[in-house]
Amino acid sequence: MSGTDESDPSELADAVFRILSDEYRRCVLYYLLDRDAATVEELATVATGWVQARESAVEIATPDDRERVRAALHHVHLPRIADAGFVRYDHNSGEVALERVPVVLESILEQSLAEDRTGRDRSEDP
Amino acid sequence: MTSRTPDSLREFVDEVAADRRTITAFTPERPEALESYFAARNVSVEHEPLPDDGSGGFVVVTADGEFVGSVGARAVRELVSPADRALEPGSSELPRLPMNLLADTTFVSFDRRQLLGASREFEDRAYRQGRGTLRAGFQALSKLEAQQAVYKSLLKRTRLDVHVYGEPDWSPDLPDATVHEEDASEIGSFWFVVFDGGDDPRQACALLAEEVSDDSGPFPGFWTYDSETVTAIDDYLRATYG
């Protein structure tokens, strides 16, 4: 059984920040926190579209972009989030479900969303 | 559209019908402007709620379940906003991108009035461009009678290469156009306007609709701004009827 030892606050903090250091992983977790479970295909679409929209108002994400993101989620990001114990990733069905979300992860995600919101409002206001 | 060239007008319509697009808006709020814009174009918009990160979310287009592309919802809002005068594809860089993604080909069931309206729009586009090839199929050449004046002025004021097609039940007086008198059954049942865009593929457009029952329609078919699709129809018509 993999997972993070929640009784060790510094280990937990390390795990949370390692996971959240990547924008694709953040988007996946934002999305999962909202609805608990999704397929890897759905997450690939969401992460591709969302990260693209966060970066540029007008650029289009192509099927190639999505395929790269899907491969990265499948091979790198989802296994890492699963190793930390936050989600369960079934490679066969493609199902990704929230597992054990420490309070600290949830509150950092919410705070990070709030900061994204205000950061963007500020940057749009010259 | 697949790479294989269809060998009948019906096949073009069938391919577009099979390639029907779905639009999914991943946005914090319900995308009402988007829904009404696409409802008028017979494309359904689905909504998946997204946590609000200030980005406004994004819009995903799928065809037959396959991802075609996505773009920020803000750019699409600009496209569908009625205040936006830049709806014309090619008129500005910003809305042109989502236009390509979202509205390049739209499957519709026209009634005769809509069909005439859309045809007028495309003829007008060719007129403004002033050069290129315009192919128009009227089912029966007699249906061109009401529009002969329009076509006369089109020929007089532009350098367009104009081809008209139809069953030979009337002889149009259009000496500068190439008139194709055809007995082929698809020429009798299909209405089309195909403009290759001249030297600007972004101006390419085509509509193709088949009369399925009697004179009142409906006419299932599609209109497209996708230059590859336009080229394929143009090639087919030239190869088959000249």
Image: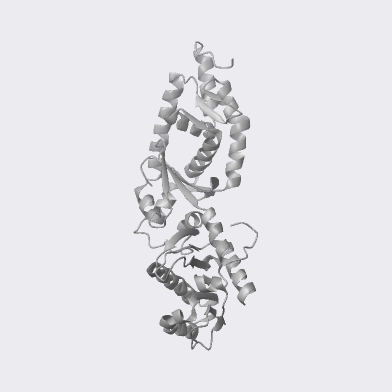
Residue B121: where, in percent of width, then height? 43, 70
Q: Is residue B150 visible?
A: no
Quadrant assignment for the C terminus of chain B: bottom right
* Number of marks in picture: 0
Q: Does B234 appear above or below A68? A: below
Between A4 and B44, the one lying in front of the other is: B44
Between B187 and B230, the one lying in front of the other is: B187
Q: Residue furthest front?
A: B213
Q: Is residue A64 visible?
A: yes
Q: Quadrant of residue B81?
A: bottom left
Q: Does A46 appear above or below A107? A: below
Q: Residue furthest top?
A: A7
Quadrant assignment for the N terminus of chain B: bottom right
Image colouring: one colour
Q: Residue at x 44, y 71 (%)?
A: B119
Residue A87: where, in percent of width, then height? 52, 24
B125 displayed left or right of A121: right
Q: Quadrant of residue A118?
A: top left
Between A4 and B35, the one lying in front of the other is: B35
Residue B161: where, in percent of width, then height? 56, 80
Residue B158: where, in percent of width, then height? 50, 82
Between B156 and B179, the one lying in front of the other is: B179
Q: Does B96 appear above or below A76? A: below
